[in-house]
């Protein structure tokens, strides 16, 4: 199967996973579902990068990293959710989602890389 097809299949699966997880959490506590998938996606991608390094030509790996996790994480949704909260006057929640996504997402990626490297 070509790399592009692996990316497409991974993207479809990742998008459906995001839809399910973020939707379930956002239903009760918007926008924490979006924050959650970005943090989980950062952690998982960090683990994969820790295992594989930053560059890979393997179509399966590209399908997982670019397709699955690209479809799963939701930076564009994060941006729109943040603007939505800001426009509703929920400045503290908007700032909290930005801080949580960036700081905890980066920490997740760092932790994931460390975990991945320890598994090699």
Image (cartoon, rainbow, N blue to C red):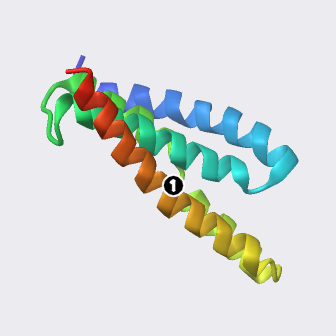
Q: Is residue 64 left or right of residue 58?
A: right
Residue 66 visible within the image: no
Residue farthest to the top, as pictured: 1
Quarter occupied by the C terminus: top left
Which sits in the foreground, 92 or 80?
92
> What residue is shown with label 1?
104
Q: Position of residue 25 (x, y in %)?
A: 77, 42
Q: Residue at x 87, y 46 (%)?
A: 28
Q: Residue at x 58, y 60 (%)?
A: 100
Query: Above or below — where is 63 with respect to 76?
Result: above
Q: Position of residue 92 (x, y in %)?
A: 74, 77
Q: Position of residue 62 (x, y in %)?
A: 26, 32
Q: Residue at x 84, y 45 (%)?
A: 27
Name the element at disc 1: helix
Which sits in the foreground, 118 or 101?
118
Q: Residue at x 18, y 42 (%)?
A: 54
Q: Is residue 48 left or right of residue 94?
A: left
Q: Is residue 102 left or right of residue 58?
A: right
Quarter occupied by the N terminus: top left
Residue 73 visible within the image: yes
Please count the marks in the image.
1
Query: Above or below — where is 52 with respect to 74?
Result: above
Q: Quadrant of residue 79?
A: bottom right
């Amino acid at each position: 199967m070509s790399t592009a097809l692996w990316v497409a299949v991974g993207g479809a699966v990742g998008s459906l996973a995001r839809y399910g997880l973020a939707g379930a959490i956002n239903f009760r506590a918007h926008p924490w579902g979006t924050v959650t998938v970005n943090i989980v996606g950062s952690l998982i991608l960090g683990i994969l990068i820790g295992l594989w390094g930053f560059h890979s030509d393997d179509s399966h790996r590209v399908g997982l990293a670019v397709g699955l996790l690209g479809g799963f994480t939701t930076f564009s949704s994060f941006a729109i959710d943040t603007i939505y909260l800001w426009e509703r006057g929920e400045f503290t929640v908007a700032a909290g989602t930005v801080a949580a996504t960036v700081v905890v997402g980066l920490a997740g990626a760092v932790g994931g890389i460390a975990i991945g490297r320890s598994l090699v």
